[in-house]
Structure formats: C-alpha cells, structure tokens
Image: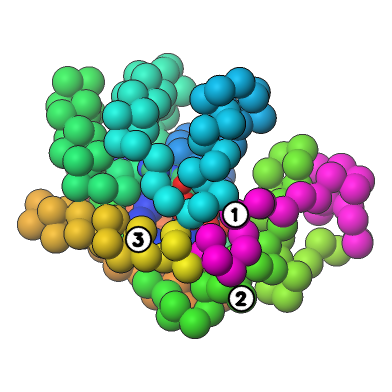
Amino acid sequence: MPINIILIGPPGAGKGTQARKIEERYGAVQLSTGDMLRETIKMGGELGDDLKKILDSGQLVPDELMIEMISNRIQMPDCEKGFILDGFPRTVTQAKSLEKMLEDAGKKLDAVIKIDVDEEDLVERIVGRFTCGECGEGYHDTFKRPEVDNVCDNCGAVDSFKRRSDDNEDAIRTRLKAYHDQTAPILPFYKEKGLLQTVDGRESMAAVTAQIYVVLDVEQAQNEAQAV
Ligand code: AP5
C-alpha cells in the first residue's frame, strides 16, 4: 500500500537524508521543494534569478508559486506509489492548500513526521554538508565522509561533490527564523488531526531512520488492514 507523508523539521534536521531512506524502503517518491527550486534556478531566466536571490537570503518563496509547483507534481503518475513531502508545506496557507489538493485528488495523508533536533547542532550540520552532483547522495565533513575522497559511494562519480550557496551562517540564521515564525505554526494544525508524530533527530542517522520505520510500518499495516 502506498504511504503519503510529510517530513517537517528546521533546516539541517535531516529531512533530505531520511527521505532517501524512506524512498528505498517504501517505494514512495521524495518531493523536495528545495531541490525543485534549485533545478529551476539552474535553468536560469528571470524566474531563476529571482528564486536564487530568495534562496540565498534564506527567506521563503511566495506561497502561490510553491502551491502551484506541488499541486502539479502531486498529480504525476509516480506519486501513485506514495510520496514524501520534504520542504512542503512551510506555511499555514500551504498546509491548508495541501489539504484541499489531496481531497480533490482523492488522496490522504498517513503521517506528518517532525524531526526534533538541538538548534546548536544545526549550523554545524549544514556548513559541513555536501552532496553528489550526479545522484544527490548526501555527505558531511564529519558525520558521513565518502569511503574514498572525492568519489561518491553511491554512484561512483568522481569530483562531482557540491555545496549549496545558502549553506552559510547568515542564511542559516534567516532559514531558522523562517522555520520558527512561519513553519512551526503548522504543527498544531496536524496535531489536531492526529497525524503528528515526533522522532528524536539528535540520534545517529541510522537510529533516526529506525524510529521513522517504526512509525511507517504501523501506518502501512493499518492501511493494509483497512484495505481487506
Ligand atoms: P530546502 O532545500 O528544503 O532546505 P531546508 O529546509 O533548509 O533543509 P535542508 O535541506 O537544509 O536540511 P535537511 O533537513 O534536508 O537536512 P539534511 O538531510 O540535508 O529549502 C531551501 C530553500 O528553498 C528555503 O530556504 C526556501 O527559500 C525555499 N523553499 C523550499 N521549500 C519551500 C516552501 N514550501 N515554501 C517556501 N519556500 C521554500 O541534513 C543536513 C546535514 O546533516 C547533512 O550533511 C547530513 O549528512 C547531516 N545529518 C543528517 N542527519 C544527521 C544525524 N542524525 N546526525 C548527524 N548528521 C546528520
């Protein structure tokens, strides 16, 4: 049975890291709005330039654009396998639009997983982060180095590692503020609906993955029981 979930947490909480693990185990597709925006920036043009300024500053992109982006994406056939929203919704307006979008598409959310972390750890996590430009595998200067320097463990690409332009201390502080002011207020909305689950993101990557699997195995078993 497909599972549809949201991962929520401040920048550097490990949403992208865990989304890739969930994809592998449950077959659901990762919908990272940050990655979608960075792809749009790569294409250039006026929109790309405008988005780059917003992302580099650490502020949020306007709701209308994000809602349109996800509403188109969620209707694509691969989302029938289930989806992991990573980076959306990020405001109360986005959360309410998502509810309507899912209702119109006849889909439901199984869980909203909040990854709890200590804020002091976040800056260290983010400034040490790099990813493979070929396959997107994530690494860290301290917590997850590639087995061979400059070679991706996952796809073998050489010299393809890259760092994000918004992974600097100033932008991180702005992103954290945006999380507190605009994203955290959506948590009560999902709590009221009985969908909110919290995992301890201060643990190792593998331990956080294990906690998420426990939550999702229960959700999947419930979906299967209801389908019988
Ligand atoms: P986005 O790309 O979504 O960035 P973010 O939310 O700031 O989150 P990150 O990708 O920085 O962190 P993450 O939680 O995925 O952590 P990761 O797994 O990489 O958004 C970027 C920008 O796009 C926003 O600022 C905004 O401008 C715009 N945007 C996007 N969506 C939007 C929306 N809906 N509305 C408006 N604007 C939007 O982990 C971080 C590092 O820590 C990695 O190196 C990893 O290896 C390491 N790590 C992970 N877990 C652990 C662990 N347990 N222990 C030790 N290290 C760990």
- Stretch in magenta: 148-172
Residue 150 lies, in percent from the top left, at 89, 56
For marks 2 and 3 on the same chain, the one whose residue lies earlier in the sequence: 2
Q: Which mark is residue 201?
A: none
The residue carrying mark 1 is: 166
The residue carrying mark 2 is: 124
Q: Residue at x 16, y 39 (%)?
A: 96
Q: Which mark is residue 179?
A: 3
Of residues 147 and 188, the one nearer the viewer is 188
Direction from residue 122 to residue 167 in the image, left or right? right
Direction from residue 97 to residue 62 in the image, left or right? right
Residue type beneath disc 2: Glu
Mark 1 and ligand 1: say if the CB distance to the nearest ligand atom is below 8 Å. Answer: yes
User: Around disc 2, counting alpha carbons within 10 Å, would you say few (fewer than 14), some (14 to 19), or many (20 or more)?
Assistant: some
Mark 3 and ligand 1: say if the CB distance to the nearest ligand atom is below 8 Å. Answer: yes
Quarter location, residue 213: bottom left
